[in-house]
Amino acid sequence: MQALRLIQRVDPSGTLHVQIPPEFGDMVELIILPSGSETAMNYAFLQQKGGFVREVLGDSGEDVWNEI
């Protein structure tokens, strides 16, 4: 997975201008957080909403490591 992390100042009008690298394609997902809000809880919440834990780690096919 590619990621682009930017910390930018918001225009007085509340507008952000983001230039997306061509290799990202024409469809991207934006997650907007206030600067300085990078706590473990915020990341845990975003991870939970993404479905990775539920769909990948919760998959019975992932239980093979328990059989070693």
Image (cartoon, rainbow, N blue to C red):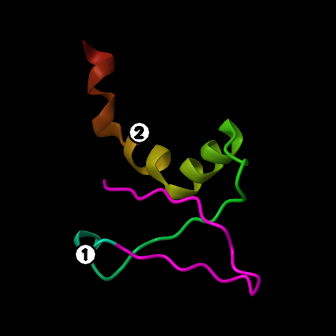
The residue pinned by badge 1 equals 22
* Pointer 1 or 2: first along the chain: 1
Amino acid type assigned to the residue bearing label 1 in the image: Pro
Q: Return the x and y of residue 66 as percentages of the image width and height.
A: 33, 18
Magenta segment boundaries in residue numbering = 1-20
Q: Return the x and y of residue 31 as percentages of the image width and height.
A: 57, 65
Q: Nearer the viewer, residue 36 or 62?
A: 36
In the displayed orientation, state which residue is furthest to the top: 68
Decide whether the magenta segment is chiefly helix, strand or loop.
Answer: loop
State yes or no: residue 6 in magenta.
yes
Amino acid type assigned to the residue bearing label 2 in the image: Leu
Q: What is the quadrant of the C terminus in the image?
A: top left
In the image: residue 23, left or right of residue 15? left
In the image: residue 65, left or right of residue 40? left
Residue at 70% in and 80% down: 11
State yes or no: residue 4 in magenta.
yes
